Amino acid sequence: MRALPLIAAVLTLALLPACEQRVVMDKSWTSQNYRTTDLETYGAGRDFHTVVIGDPFGQGQAAFTQAVTRELSRQSGALRVNFTDRPDASASDFYRIVLAFNPATSLSRERLCRNQASVSGGPPQKDIELAGAFCGSNKAVTYLQARFKGPATSVRDPEFREFLRAYMQSLFPRNASKQAGL
């Protein structure tokens, strides 16, 4: 009977690494102009311009961009948002999303929206960093920095898919509390 508490303690310690939080939301910011219906208003049933920078899996930028936008579109469910790097005329000219994976330098929300051409992704690594913004013209409406504690092998990795889902829910918060600048 004395062995049972010891066995329970050993099992608990053995399971702790599996319970480690793999998704960490580091910094977030929400403009006072953000409305919780923005994604529905500007994306539901049509194209939504999505800029993907970096390739944390080393599969090539074009292939990674297509995999990410396909996954985001799949996750949009009933909204049927078509996240794409090649939007058609149905997309808003004013709004877009910029996602920088493993950014080579520290990024501000302003830089992501105003000067995304100057942003580059870093090399593949075990943990994946993601800085992104929902931009209205050249100003951020929402901004989020997050980390996925890897490893992940591709966009099809179930845990990486969960990371993207959690990230997008935080980038487009349903219960937005207005925050002062970062």
Image (cartoon, rainbow, N blue to C red):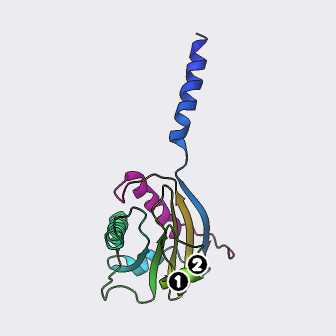
Outermost residue on the front side: it is: 123
Query: SS of the residue at dot 1?
Result: helix
Residue 157 covered by magenta stretch: yes
* Mark 1 neighbour density, 10 Å: few (under 14) some (14–19) many (20 or more): many
- Residue 106 visible to the viewer: yes
Task: Tell me which amino acid carries mark 1.
Answer: Cys
Which is nearer the eye, 8 or 89?
Answer: 8
Query: Which residue is found at the position 59% from the left and 25% from the top?
Result: 9
Q: Which residue is located at x 56 percent, y 23 percent?
A: 8
**Circle 2 is placed at which residue position?**
109
Residues drawn in magenta: 153-182
Quadrant in the picture for the N terminus? top right
Image position of 156 with respect to 52: above or below = above
Q: Position of residue 180 (x, y in %)?
A: 69, 75
Image position, residue 121 (x, y; %): 48, 72
Q: Which mark is residue 97?
A: none
Q: Which mark is residue 113?
A: 1
Residue 11 counted in the magenta span: no
Does 140 sit left or right of 58 as displayed? right
- 27 is higher (above) or lower (below) than 115: above
Looking at the image, do the residues carrying marks 2 and 1 touch, with CB atoms under 8 Å apart?
yes
User: In this rendering, does residue 173 appear at all?
Assistant: no
Q: Residue at x 53, y 27 (%)?
A: 11
